[in-house]
Image: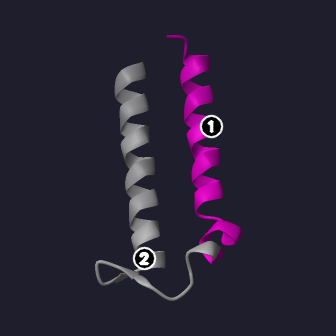
Amino acid sequence: MPASVRAARLFCLFLAALLLFNYPLLAVFSGPGSVLGIPVLYAYLFAAWLAVIALAALLVRRLA
């Protein structure tokens, strides 16, 4: 796979991560409540960060 395709996919992942961790979306999850005893905002941050890392690893491994 050409390097330009790899770079484009990783750049799209970067933009998705920027959107996931930007204020308007974080404000949606900052309300009261909990998931298994963990505040919703912290659960969202952990899950989104895990998803970004997993997708980056998958893209780098698959495209290498």
62 in relation to 55, above or below = above
- Magenta span contains residue 3: yes
Which residue bears the numbered disc 2?
Answer: 42
Task: Check residue 12 in the rendering and tell me which mark sits there, or answer none.
Answer: 1
Residue, far top? 1
* Magenta segment, prevailing SS (helix, strand or loop): helix
Residue drawn 62% across the image and 37% down it: 12
Disc 1, SS: helix
Q: Nearer the viewer, mark 2 or mark 1?
A: 2
The image quarter containing residue 28 is bottom right
Front-most of residues 43 and 6: 43
Residue drawn 46% across the image and 68% down it: 45
**Image-based side of 47 in relation to 24, left or right:** left
Residue drawn 45% across the image and 77% down it: 40
Residue, far bottom? 32
Q: Position of residue 31 (x, y in %)?
A: 56, 85
